[in-house]
Amino acid sequence: MSLFERVNYQGVEGIRCRRKNSVNTSFITYRIGDTIIDTAPANQWQFVKPFFQEQPIRQILLTHHHEDHSGNAARLKALSGITPMGSQGTCLIMEKGFPFH
């Protein structure tokens, strides 16, 4: 089950997804203007996709490769046509792919 919270502070918008099960986890994806920062875990796509579609996107930035930050990068690229950007290390890992459970 996912719980949601909208964040809006001084021009920074976000959506927090939370799962409450044996481990309480929380993920936030941000938007500043037309820039998306991090894409949330893949299993939250149905919930974050509407957030991504609310406004035009010009760029997508990934803070790092962990799945809770980059899990929807490929889907968001397919939706927007925009290639996500990140550090050189993040880009190398994302290009190769990595396992997650």
Image (spheres, helix red, strand yellow):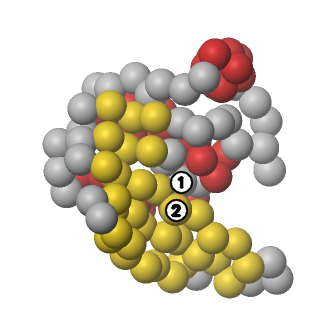
- At 47% from the left edge and 56% from the top edge, which residue is drawn? 29
Residue extending farthest front: 10
Residues at marks 2 and 1, CA–CA distance in whole angstroms: 7 Å
Mark sitting on residue 75: none
Q: Residue at x 37, y 44 (%)?
A: 36
Q: Relative to 97, does residue 39 appear above or below in the rendering?
A: below
Rendered location of residue 85, percent (x, y): 48, 25
The 10 Å Cα crowd at callout 2, few under 14, some 14 to 19, many 20 or more, is: many
Q: Position of residue 76 (x, y in %)?
A: 38, 39
The amino acid type found where label 2 is placed reads Ile
Tell whether 96 sits left or right of 27. right
Circle 1 Cα neighbour tier, 10 Å, few/some/many (<14 / 14–19 / ≥20): many
Q: Are marks 2 and 1 in contact (CB under 8 Å)?
A: yes
- Find numbered disc 2 in the image and state the secondary structure of the residue it sits on: strand
In the rendered structure, which amino acid carries the disc numbered 1? Ala
Which one is earlier in the sequence, the residue at label 2 or at label 1? 2
Q: Which residue is depicted at the point 50% across and 46% down? A: 38
Q: Is residue 29 above or below residue 4?
A: above
Reply above or below: 20 against 66. Answer: below
Residue for point 63% across, 70% down: 26
> Circle 1 — which element?
loop
Left or right: 64, with 24 as reference point: left
- Quarter of the image for residue 88 reads top right
| Nearest-to-viewer mark from 2 and 1 | 2
Which residue position is annotated with label 2? 28
Residue 41 located left or right of residue 75: right
Q: Position of residue 46 (x, y in %)?
A: 41, 62
The answer to whether 91 is drawn above or below residue 21 in the figure is above
Residue of label 1: 40
